[in-house]
């Protein structure tokens, strides 16, 4: 079978045409953006144009955008005790992270293990706000990191409420907005977050580019007193090293395209995702869709059928022409029980079978047909076999 359908957009999205064109154009330029000659200034111009495009995606001014090699680096840059608020040179004394964060946040950045506390979530994977308040009460100058939307379930966090709680407790809020950007409104001012991480390759830009964005209206501003990568004045001394002009350009162009198409894409993806989930329930009524009653991204569905094993299901989907992933697309390539589902209190037996389907702006009805046909085959063969082996 030659026909294939790609349903792993939360792992990475295909490069948008706008992103590719911008990258190809940038690759033809010889200049280093730090050079003062015309070639250098041309490279600088591309970076600054991209900065404006990324800033527009999150509703801020270009000067608040710092380019990085991706969201992992942006998260590492943000999660440091050396964050100064309102000009006060006092280190953050505690890091509170939700228990469903991406590993680049849950590892705690540059905080000591003894300073990090995990916040529980409810059965939908939404942060427990009472637990947040209780944890904040124990810290003097906390930094809190909560993601906008979860990469496995697509569940969206109540960031505005969290902002109000964190700020009332003298805290700073960092939001990993990687999965939300380009899919739902990601305006940093509306969200109220102090710092926001973005990744280019989830919204149609290249892999290996991202940004940390600062809120502009914090009185006195949030200063990152310790860069992660030192040794040069690039990115206003926050990120040393010659800029990857082509990747940054591709990021900017993709951010603009994603922003322009966001609302129409979201409506289309949600309709396709809902059609898939409805059919899933009809064909295999015992299937559980995780976070189904919570507010979710329009493109994500994480589900499991009792008795299913994710590793065999993914291979079987692949043989049927469909690329899906397990709940946690583990970077080591192994399928492990998802920490997100564990934090949500899902039984390990069910969590072992969690399969994630994530859609994108080119997903069609025909792709959903292929996915459903594949599921029918996977369900009838694997469910029987895995149940026999259990
Ligand atoms: N945070 C979230 C929620 C993610 O899904 C990812 C990518 N899987 C990252 C951070 C890391 O992004 P990057 O690949 O740009 O390092």
Image: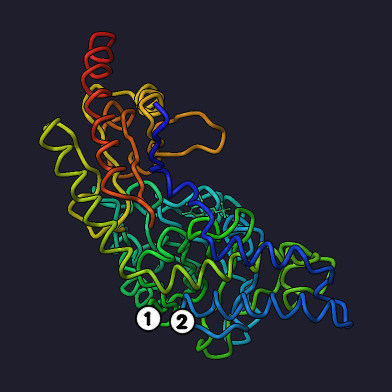
Quarter of the rendering containing residue 367: top left
Count of numbered circles in the view? 2
Residue appearing at x 87%, y 77% in the figure: 35
Work out how far the residue at label 1 is from the one at label 2, CA to CA, in angstroms.
9 Å
Give the image location of residue 307, x and y in percent: 24, 21
Give the image location of residue 142, x and y in percent: 50, 69
Q: Quadrant of the C terminus?
A: top left
* Residue 204 against residue 310 in the figure, above or below: below
**Dot 1, crowdedness within 10 Å: few (<14), some or many (≥20)?**
few
Residue appearing at x 39%, y 34% in the figure: 3
Quarter of the rendering containing residue 350: top left
Residue topped by disc 1: 190
In-front residue for pair 360/124: 360
Q: Secondary structure at mark 2?
A: loop
Residue appearing at x 67%, y 80% in the figure: 48
Residue that lies at the very extreme toward the top in this rendered image: 388
- Mark 1 or mark 2: name the one nearer the start of the chain: 2
Q: Secondary structure at mark 1?
A: helix
Give the image location of residue 207, x and y in percent: 60, 53
Q: Quadrant of the N terminus?
A: top left
The numbered disc on residue 59 is: 2
* Residue 65 against residue 97 in the figure, above or below: below
Give the image location of residue 204, x and y in percent: 51, 59
């Amino acid at each position: 079978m030659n026909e294939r359908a790609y349903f792993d957009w939360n792992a990475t999205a295909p490069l948008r045409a706008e992103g590719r064109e911008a990258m190809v154009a940038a690759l033809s330029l010889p200049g280093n953006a730090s050079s003062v000659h015309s070639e250098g200034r041309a490279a600088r111009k591309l970076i600054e144009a991209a900065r404006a495009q990324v800033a527009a995606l999150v509703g801020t001014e270009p000067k608040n955008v710092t380019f990085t090699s991706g969201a992992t680096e942006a998260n590492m840059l943000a999660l440091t005790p050396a964050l100064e608020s309102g000009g006060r040179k006092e280190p953050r004394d505690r890091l509170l992270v939700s228990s469903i964060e991406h590993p680049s946040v849950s590892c705690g950045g540059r905080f000591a293990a003894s300073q990090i506390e995990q916040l529980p979530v409810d059965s939908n994977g939404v942060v427990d706000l009472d637990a947040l308040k209780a944890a904040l009460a124990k810290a003097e100058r906390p930094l809190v990191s909560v993601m906008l939307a979860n990469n496995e379930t697509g569940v969206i966090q109540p960031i505005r409420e969290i902002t109000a709680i964190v700020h009332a407790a003298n805290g700073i809020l960092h939001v990993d907005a990687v999965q939300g950007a380009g899919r739902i409104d990601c305006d940093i001012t509306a969200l109220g977050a102090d710092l926001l991480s973005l990744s280019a390759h989830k919204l149609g830009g290249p892999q290996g580019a991202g940004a940390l964005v600062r809120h502009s209206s914090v009185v006195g501003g949030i200063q990152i007193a310790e860069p992660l990568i030192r040794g040069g004045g690039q990115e206003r001394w926050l990120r040393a090293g010659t800029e990857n002009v082509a990747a940054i350009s591709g990021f900017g162009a993709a951010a603009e395209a994603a922003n322009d198409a966001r609302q129409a894409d979201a409506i289309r993806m949600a309709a396709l995702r809902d059609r898939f989930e409805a059919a899933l329930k009809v064909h295999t009524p015992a299937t559980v869709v995780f976070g189904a009653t919570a507010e979710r991204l329009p493109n994500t569905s994480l589900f499991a059928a009792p008795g299913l094993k994710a590793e065999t299901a993914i291979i079987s989907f692949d043989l049927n022409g469909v690329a899906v992933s397990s709940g946690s697309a583990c970077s080591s390539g192994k399928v492990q029980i998802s920490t997100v589902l564990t934090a949500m209190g899902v039984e390990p037996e069910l969590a072992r079978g969690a399969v994630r389907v994530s859609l994108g702006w080119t997903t069609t009805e025909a792709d959903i047909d292929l996915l459903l046909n594949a599921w029918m085959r996977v369900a009838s063969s694997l469910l029987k076999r895995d149940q026999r082996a259990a």
